[in-house]
């Protein structure tokens, strides 16, 4: 009887212990689930959009560089979705592609060149826009100032007034006998308004005659080179423009077929047989554009993110092309080159 009473007396204690164990298990399970919920929140997929002027093939390396920049900042396929549209070099397609991307309501939009930037600017005044490589954001009306953009657009500029002059000086040093030099520009690119005056000023200092030839589409490039020959050009300076870049192989082939020594703004031309290039590293610009996207995704406003200008310029020389043109590149150029292709 005493044992039975003892068992009855211990029953409430055992029941209390069971309840405590249940509460402990519930709390433990909840604690284990909380990190998963937090991780689920952290891995929410963000959406950005990318509008490219060229084709998938011609733009692939820059998109890949941009993706690598994002990965270095912690973004991958699990937490970021990139919607990309390619205009295939057709300016008339950009407006529709920009409108299509705006309808997706991405958190950030990225333009890879001036023409896509203009299309995105016209398509939205509210969604944040990052420009990876823009000629002159001020002349194009994209920002109020470089230090304080003031709207929904920011990014990286290619503007450097001395770049065209330096390119002409390098070309003149490589081809000292050239007295009549052509400069190929796209009149639709606002950057031309900066390139031409700077190049003409440099030409006067070098006592060299400079004349401009225009091409505002891929179909105009052949005609432009034919005009250079009719005007007795002895060398040519190629403006950095998305149209010329997307047609880089044909531009280089035309220069070679007409035996025209040429200097380009981007190293990509030298990689396919161009003589020389002097200008910023495009891959570096697209990699840096990822940092702008990251800051905006974390809450920064484009209006408060200053537009940055290139500080690093590279000189690339192709000695194979020089030999084919019968040129001897001076040691002063070779000594200052960042890369020499032999």
Image (cartoon, helix red, strand yellow):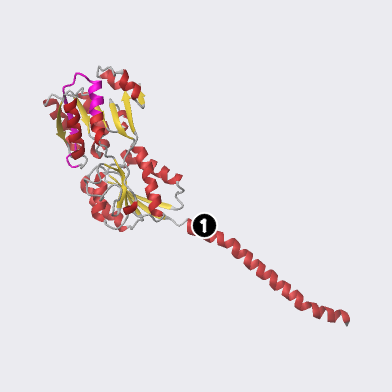
Nearer to me, 6 or 265: 265
Q: Is residue 8 magenta?
A: no
**Is the residue 118 above or below the residue 171 in the image?**
below
**Is the residue 288 above or below the residue 248 in the image?**
below
Count the labels in the image. 1
**Residue designated by label 1:** 39
Q: Position of residue 148 (x, y in %)?
A: 30, 51
- Disc 1 element: helix
- The residue segment tinted magenta is 167-188
Quarter where residue 53 is shown: top left
Q: Position of residue 328 (x, y in %)?
A: 28, 17
- The quadrant the N terminus occupies is bottom right
Quarter where residue 309 is shown: top left
**Is the residue 69 above or below the residue 16 in the image?**
above
Q: Is residue 186 magenta?
A: yes
- The quadrant the C terminus occupies is top left
Residue 83 appears in the rendering? yes
């Amino acid at each position: 009887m005493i044992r039975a009473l003892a068992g009855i007396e211990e029953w409430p204690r055992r029941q209390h212990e069971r309840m405590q164990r249940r509460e402990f298990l519930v709390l433990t399970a909840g604690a284990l689930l909380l990190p998963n919920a937090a991780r689920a929140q952290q891995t929410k997929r963000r959406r950005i959009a990318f509008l490219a002027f060229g084709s998938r093939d011609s733009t692939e390396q820059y998109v890949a560089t941009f993706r690598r920049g994002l990965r270095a900042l912690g973004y991958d396929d699990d937490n970021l979705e990139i919607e990309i549209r390619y205009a295939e070099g057709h300016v008339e397609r950009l407006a529709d592609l920009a409108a299509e991307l705006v309808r997706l309501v991405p958190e950030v939009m990225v333009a890879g060149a001036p023409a896509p930037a203009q299309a995105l600017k016209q398509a939205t005044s509210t969604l944040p826009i990052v420009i990876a490589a823009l000629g002159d954001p001020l002349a194009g009306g994209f920002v109020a100032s470089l230090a304080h953009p003031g709207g929904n657009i920011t990014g990286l500029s290619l503007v450097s007034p001395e770049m065209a002059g330096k390119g002409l000086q390098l070309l003149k040093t490589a081809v000292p006998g050239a007295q009549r030099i052509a400069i190929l520009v796209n009149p639709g690119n606002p950057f031309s308004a900066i390139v031409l005056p700077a190049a003409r000023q440099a030409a006067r200092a070098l006592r060299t005659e400079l004349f401009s030839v225009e091409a505002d589409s891929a179909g105009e490039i052949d005609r432009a080179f034919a005009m250079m020959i009719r005007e007795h050009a002895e060398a040519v300076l190629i403006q950095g423009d998305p149209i010329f870049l997307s047609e880089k192989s044909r531009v280089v082939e035309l220069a070679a077929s007409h035996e025209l020594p040429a200097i380009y703004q981007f190293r990509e031309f030298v990689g396919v047989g161009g003589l020389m290039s002097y200008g910023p590293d495009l891959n570096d610009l697209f990699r840096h554009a990822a940092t702008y996207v990251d800051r905006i995704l974390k809450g920064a406003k484009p209006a408060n993110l200053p537009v940055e200008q290139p500080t690093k310029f590279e000189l690339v020389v192709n000695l194979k092309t020089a030999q084919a043109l019968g040129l001897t590149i001076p040691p002063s150029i070779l000594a200052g080159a960042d890369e020499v292709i032999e």
